[in-house]
Image (cartoon, helix red, strand yellow):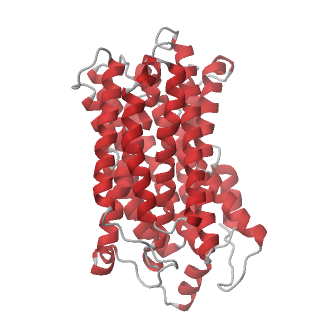
Amino acid sequence: MMEATVDANQSFSQTTRWLVVITAGFGFAFDLYEMVVQAIVLRPILMELGPFVPGTPAFNRWAGIALFVPPVVGGLASLAGGYLTDRLGRQRVLVWSIVLYGGAAFMSGLSGSLYELLFWRCIVVAGICVEFVAALAWLSELFPETYRRERALALAQACATLGNFMIAGVYLAAVSFADAMPAVQGGHSPWRYTLIFGALPAIPLMILRPFLPESPLWQRRRATGTLRRTRIRELFEPRLRRVTILSTLLVGCCYALAFGMLQHIPRVVPGIPGVAELARRAQEQFVSYVHFYVDTGSFLGRLVFVGLAVYVISRKRMLQSFLWLGLVIFPFVFLGPAMQDIDRFKYAVVFASILVGAQYSFWGNYLPRVFPLHLRGTGASFGASVGGRVIAPLAALATTQLSNLVPGATATAKLTTSIALVAVTFTVLALLLSTRLPEPAPELPED
């Protein structure tokens, strides 16, 4: 495959820089699409392939498995991806990770059983996790100036929210027009079209990304033979041990808000008064409508971070502000009066999503800034993989299993109580851990 090569000291034009940001943002958008789409289509998948009745122990057990296993497999795979990113180059790993998850996304839509779907979803999430780490290292090194690097990372990650909007639009279209689409596996299930759509970005990105520049800093070190060998154990040496452990645990707490709270909203919506009485197709359309508001909140949260990243110096204080607000807002959304009316609920989830979206961008900005060049991909992948894909998915299991145990008049009431308990628990834990989080240096650390 062709690869663009550049002199390490070359100054990129403004057009090239914007192309890099747009390309990365496009990739982030479909990364998020693939991560979140499982939660949107989970209910109809389990009802069809199970078949299970929503709210039953069997349904909740498989919901936990589907939301837990792929991220864990993906997180472990991305540890190897982070290593390869540091050894083979940021751009090359980006391209092949996109090829991997694009093909697996297509195959997941053709699955004939829950076990087959689980296999392909594991491959999809593995590719996403690797791509995410490579992209962060790539962007942070293509923009050596502090101000431009902050803006590039924040803006590219803000584009990720477009993936959420795509889910809402694609699933609404699939639910509304499934009968007019070509049959897949002998039927017209909207969830299959929604999963298959995730394969589309691989085509333009495979064409475009090989012609984009490799990281000049990484390329120079490799050309001169000064690129140090990557060793994961260095992350736990005295100079990096604290930031490695704390950032991993805190990423886990942040992502747990998505796995244990936001990803269960599509299962909450059909049980809210005003929706529960509707036919199944109308309920699934409401799932798309409410998801649009969740997406809006996530987008606004990332924009909030874009503004704060340039003007707020203390990263620790910024993170703690998000967490304190969440401690108030999360239980209010899922235990308050919003649960009695779908119109109130859709606006309430905007505020919860703002806080989660802002924290996502926070960690995408923080991780590449605290590890030296030869460990930048490995360090960021360790935090994002172990924290965001191994620890955080435990929240999905906690929410689904707690909903079998907590009191409640309906399955939806039990689920929302479980969501609130999980969200508050991980937020409190994050607040305690954040008191020890080190501030990143203004400049990228060297080897």
Give the residue drawn at x 63%, y 74%. 143
> What x and y, as percent, mark residue 91?
59, 68
> What x and y, as percent, mark residue 231?
35, 77
Say which of 62 and 137 sits in front.
137
As drawn, 145 above or below 164: below
> What x and y, as percent, mark residue 294?
53, 36
Residue 73 visible in the snapshot: no
Give the residue drawn at x 59%, y 75%. 146
As drawn, 247 above or below 262: below
Residue 131 visible in the snapshot: yes
As drawn, 230 above or below 46: below
Say which of 148 and 371 sits in front.
148
> What x and y, as percent, mark residue 244?
33, 68
Query: Looking at the figure, which quarter contains the C terminus?
Result: bottom left
| Side of 411 where 141 appears, left or right | right
Query: Looking at the figure, which quarter contains the N terminus?
Result: bottom right
Q: Residue reaching furthest left?
A: 405
Q: Quadrant of residue 82?
A: bottom left
As drawn, 274 above or below 134: above
Q: How many marks?
A: 0
